[in-house]
Image: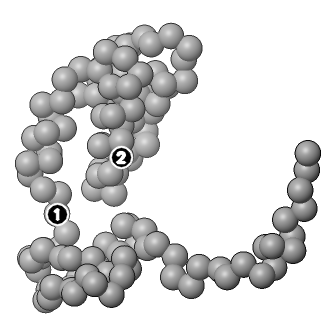
């Protein structure tokens, strides 16, 4: 069965304010030195900010330690979990996609196999 949804699509109200991307919001903060709390009742497009030094946005050191102490992945789920966490910080890591490529290759196989290249990438 096939339905033609064009008529419904014409009368549907489009989103006026798309959900902002984190990297776009952080780019807007570049160079800023003074921040204030935002009253969040007015919507999802506002975020609560912590104090930021004049040196700019930095990675939380406790998160770096969590990544360093992450146990070696033993299955696809473990690799995806680690990749998801590490990918959040990709903007702070030069050449992240090249570094993480062996981890991505592990996910493309039918059977899980942890290679020496994947170990180097993980470390």
Identify whether 91 is placed above or below 21: above
Residue 66 vs residue 13, the one in the foreground = 13
Identify whether 121 is placed above or below 94: above
Residue 90 vs residue 38, the one in the foreground = 38
Tell me if residue 29 can be seen. no
Q: Quadrant of the C terminus?
A: top left
Q: Which mark is residue 25?
A: none
Q: Residue furthest front?
A: 1
What residue is disc 2 on?
A: 87
At 36% from the left and 76% from the top, the residue drawn is 44
At 27% from the left and 77% from the top, the residue drawn is 47
Tell me if residue 67 can be seen. yes
Q: Position of residue 58 (x, y in %)?
A: 16, 63
Q: Secondary structure at mark 1?
A: loop
Q: Quadrant of the N terminus?
A: top right
At 79% from the left and 73% from the top, the residue drawn is 9
What residue is disc 1 on?
A: 58
Q: Position of residue 25 (x, y in %)?
A: 35, 75
Answer with the quarter of the image where residue 37 lies.
bottom left
At 84% from the left and 65% from the top, the residue drawn is 5
């Amino acid at each position: 069965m096939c339905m033609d949804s064009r008529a419904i699509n014409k009368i549907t109200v489009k989103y006026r304010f798309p959900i902002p991307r984190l990297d776009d919001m952080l780019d807007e903060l570049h160079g800023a030195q003074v921040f204030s709390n935002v009253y969040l009742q007015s919507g999802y497009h506002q975020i609560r900010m912590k104090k930021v030094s004049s040196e700019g946005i930095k990675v939380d050191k406790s998160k770096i330690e969590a990544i360093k102490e992450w146990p070696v992945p033993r299955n696809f789920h473990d690799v995806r979990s680690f990749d998801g966490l590490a990918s959040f910080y990709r903007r702070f890591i030069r050449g992240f996609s090249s570094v993480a490529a062996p981890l991505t290759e592990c996910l493309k196989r039918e059977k899980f196999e942890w290679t020496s290249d994947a170990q180097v990438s993980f470390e």
